[in-house]
Image (cartoon, rainbow, N blue to C red):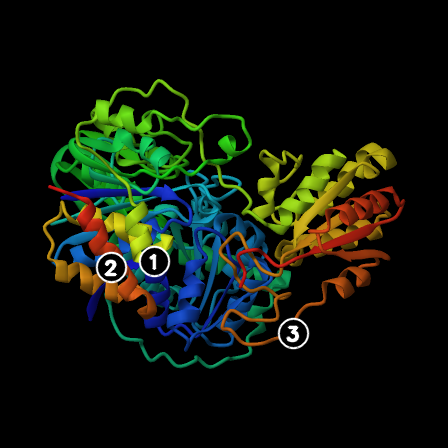
Amino acid sequence: MSRQLMLGNEAIARGAWEAGCHVAAGYPGTPSTEILETISRDYRDIKAQWSPNEKVALEVAAGASVAGARSLSTMKHVGLNVAADPLFTFSYTGVNGGLVIINADDPGAWSSQNEQDNRHIARAAKLPMLEPSNPGEAKEFTKLAFELSEKYDRPVIIRITTRIAHSQGPVETGERGNVPLKDFVRDPKKYVMIPAHARPRHVFVEQQILKLKDYSSTSGLNKIEWRNKKRGIISNGVAYQYVREVCPDDSVLKIGMVWPLPDELIKEFASQVEELYVVEELDPFIEDYVKALGFKVKGKELIPICGELTPEIVDKALNGKDAEKVLPEYAGALPGRPPGLCKGCPHAFVFNVLKKLDVVVNGDIGCYTLGVLPPYSSMHSQGCMGASIGMHLGFEKARGDEMARHSVAVIGDSTFIHSGITALIDMVYNRGTGTVIIMDNRVTAMTGHQENPATGKTLMGDDTYELDLEMMVKACGVKRVVVIDPKNMEELEKVIKEEIAAPEPSVIMTRRKCILKK
Amino acid sequence: MKNVIFAGVGGQGVILASKVLMEVAQKRGFDVKESEVHGMAQRGGSVDCNVRYGTEVFSPLIPKGGADFVVSLEMLESMRKIDYLKKDAVLIVNREQINPAPVEIGAMKYPEDIEEWLRKNFANTVVVDTTEALKEAGTKKALNIVMLGCLSKYLDFEMKDWEDAIKALVKEQFVEQNLKAFTLGRELIRL
């Protein structure tokens, strides 16, 4: 045992390694990315990989689990939406080797398109969800999650938030457990979900969740810290730390297992305190549950539902205390410092041309989403990974040829592979005539330069087949395919004009290495 | 408990500076917590790190009005942290201006009165000029460690603690340069 400072994400990687995890698969997404990067750097006895998207990543991990391996899948909160299809049914099949899914929520939307609260997903998919409140717990909970997964035959989700993922703290490290692969036994009634098999598995799922509800009250993951009983506060994750800091004398029910919630503990706690509060980030998830148990509780009437919490927000809400201001208000205007495309960024050349042409731009997720901001101000729709091409087709379906002749979709190489390919197939199949610009900078840039199927390297650094994007789009049925270096802006402008004008689907690949890539 | 905020612009290396401080505090037996910003903020946006150490630290975030030190690697960025200063805190600011995008495109002006305003309104403002130190260190990249050197003058750790932490966290070929930068930073502060 030794004590080391680690980022929450590094601690999770360590926990998986100590638990004897064999296989790990994920897709990069802030704030989850460092987990697999740490594994590929420090724990190379785990077979780790970037998959093309979160759905595939979870399926790889689930396959490894059924085959007998302890396996891990990592993603950001919106990534779990992509992986929701396998998630909900792997809940029915359960596991063989332990299967742990790391879900990184992003209250405050530091680097995300929304602030969804994925505790709801655990409830909907009927899966246990643990939530650490510091890096030390992140490691311990990850380790424990593998055991729970096997014991209760459930995939286990660990929910972290940005302030756990990207927060450092002391972690007690241990050795790697020697966990051999479990036998793979052919068991179609468990692993093949035809309706006749799914119905009895649903009964099993409900039984397991009831057992886990008992476990939730007795395991110590949820625990009462009795102090003054005048005020009792239920809290989870990093919010628990804020509560401890600003309400040091109050009793606290610390929630480390956010699903299923511990009915018995909640009743014990709620019935003994004079006033009951819930302090949680985002939705009133615990609050609504406590109310449904019949208790009067204060929560979102005091604690904001939007944005992340801070110690001073909790201090103000619970103690009515305002932070002391020692400096006066600065009277001048302070310019903000929004993130922007780097100097020399290949995307910038493309956006300069798009701005000049004043076309409608259906955008996507990546560094290039910054094309929405000045000085480019050239993006008019964007929602999720891969959406640009489908939306582009929708624009054409709604407003016809005229729209297609004055618009483009822009999407990065990694995002195209993630979930743009199927939309391109749709565009060709359903007789769209739009133009798609694949901004191929040869890397998954925004999350910090991860490899992807088009880079020719794996997460572990091995050489591999480099996906041929031109061949790919041609195979989708696109006949007009142009590859161009976007730095040649004059030529690029000409090409974009030509391709937009052409009444058939076209793809322009603007290919230039990310300026930050060595 | 001590609370230190490092502020700067993405790419200036606030995370390394905070890591060195954490390493020193942890070696000295303190409980340590830190919070940092990744992702979109790295594309030239504002970044900060909160470092806290003491007997027992709960929140990884420093509350407003709770910072003992704010170390800002850039002028304008210091202004975003003034609400975090305690009454008796020390604000250490590098006298460098990096234009943010709204200034670059001419939509706004870079406020020229920050130094004067800070000195007038907060007595414990220490504005340092790191130009010479960086020349001597041989690389502008060492700014984070120069600023850490400045901070170190106010903290009760031994020089050896700092050296060990820098050696542990900086790539071997850059250790000498960073140790030098650290010392040069210390020399910028006269107490």
Q: Which mark is residue B180?
A: 2
The amino acid beneath tag 1 is Gly
Q: Nearer the viewer, mark 3 or mark 2?
A: 2
Q: Quadrant of residue A317?
A: top left
Q: Distance from label 3 to label 1 (Cα)?
A: 42 Å
Label 2 close to label 1 by CB (< 8 Å): yes
Q: Seen in the image, is B148 located left or right of residue A386?
A: left
Q: Position of residue A23 (x, y in %)?
A: 47, 72
Name the residue nearer the viewer: B133 or A5: B133
Mark 3, secondary structure of its residue = loop
Packing grade of label 1 (10 A; few <14, some 14-19, many >=20) is some
Q: Residue at x 81, y 48 (%)?
A: A495
**In this rendering, does residue B13 appear at all?**
yes
In the image, is residue B162 above or below residue A379? Answer: below
Tell me the tag on residue A465: 3
Q: Quadrant of residue A136?
A: bottom left
Residue type at mark 2: give it: Lys
Closer to us: mark 3 or mark 1?
1
Most extreme residue toward the right is A503
Q: Crowding at label 3, few (<14), some or many (≥20) Cα neighbours within 10 Å?
A: few
Q: Nearer the viewer, residue A142 or A512?
A: A512
Q: Which residue is mark 1?
A: B138
Residue sitting nearer the eye, A210 or A281:
A281
Instruction: Please tell me if label 3 and label 2 are on a single chain.
Output: no
Residue A77: x and y, percent? Answer: 48, 49
Q: Chain of mark 1?
A: B
Instruction: Single out the residue that lies furthest toward the top.
Output: A331
The answer to whether tags 2 and 1 share a subunit is yes
Q: CA distance from mark 2 to mark 1?
A: 10 Å
In the rendered image, is residue A5 in sight? no
